[in-house]
Amino acid sequence: MIPNILTILRIASAPILVLVLVSNDTNMIILGLVIFILSSITDFLDGYLARSFNQSSRLGKILDPIADKLLITCALISLISNNIIQDIHVIAATLIIIREIFISGLREFIKGNVLKVTFLAKVKTTVQMIAIIILIPSTILEFNFDLNFLGILLLWVSSFLSLLTAYQYIKVSIDNDSL
C-alpha cells in the first residue's frame, strides 16, 4: 500500500535528516530543508491517499503518528544542536518533544480508539512543520525581516498547541475511564 510506503519513507528520513542538519555547510542545510519538506508532504499524502482509496490499515494507524513524532523530534534536536533554537526557546522545543513522547505512551497505554486525532492536533503538526521549515534555512537566507524570529514565534505557537492538545487527550482519556 502506497500510504504505508510513504510513512516508512518518512520514518527512514528522520535519522538522515539529523545527519544532514548537524552540518553547518550551506548545501547540507538546503538538502536538510528539502528532506524535511518532502517528508512533511508525505505526511499529508499518506493520509489523503489512504482516505481516497479506502486503504486504512492497522500498521498505518500505528506507524503514521510514530513517523510524525520521529520527524519533528529529530528536526528539533538537530536545530538545537546547531544553535538555531537556543536559550529560552529550547524550552518550547522541549515541551513539544515531551508532549510527543507522552501522547505516544498514552496511546500505547489506552490501546483503543479513544484518542482519535483531532483537528487541532493536525493544526499543531502543521504549525510545527512550518516553524521547522522556516528555522532550518534561517541562518543561511537573508530577507528584509528576521526569518529566525518568525520560526521561533511559530515554534512557541506550536508549543502552546502541543500543550493544549495534550490536555484534550488527557481529558478524553479520563472522561472515557481509560486512565
Image (cartoon, grey):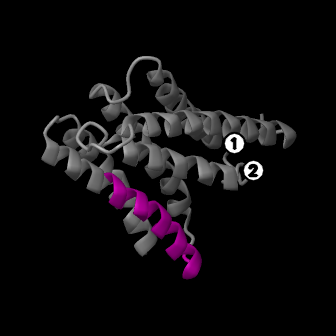
Marks 1 and 2, how far apart at CA: 8 Å
Residue at left 57%, top 71%?
Answer: 56
Q: Position of residue 139 (x, y in %)?
A: 26, 36
**Mark 2, secondary structure of its residue:** loop
**What number is the disc on residue 123?**
none
Q: Are marks 1 and 2 in contact (CB under 8 Å)?
A: yes
Is residue 33 on the magenta stretch?
no
Locate the C terminus and report the quarter of the image it occupies: top right
Instruction: Residue 41: say if magenta.
Output: yes
Q: Nearer the viewer, residue 81 or 67?
A: 81
Q: Which secondary structure dominates the residues rendered in magenta?
A: helix
Residue at 34%, 27% in the rendered image:
80
Q: Is residue 7 above or below residue 67?
A: below
What are the residue bounds of the magenta stretch?
36-55
From this viewpoint, is residue 118 visible? no
**What residue is pinned by disc 1?**
110
Between disc 1 and disc 2, the foreground one is 2
Q: Is residue 121 above or below residue 166?
A: below
The residue that disc 2 covers is: 114
Residue 85 x %, y %? 38, 28
Q: Name the amino acid type tagged 2.
A: Val
- In-image side of 55 versus 14 (left or right): right
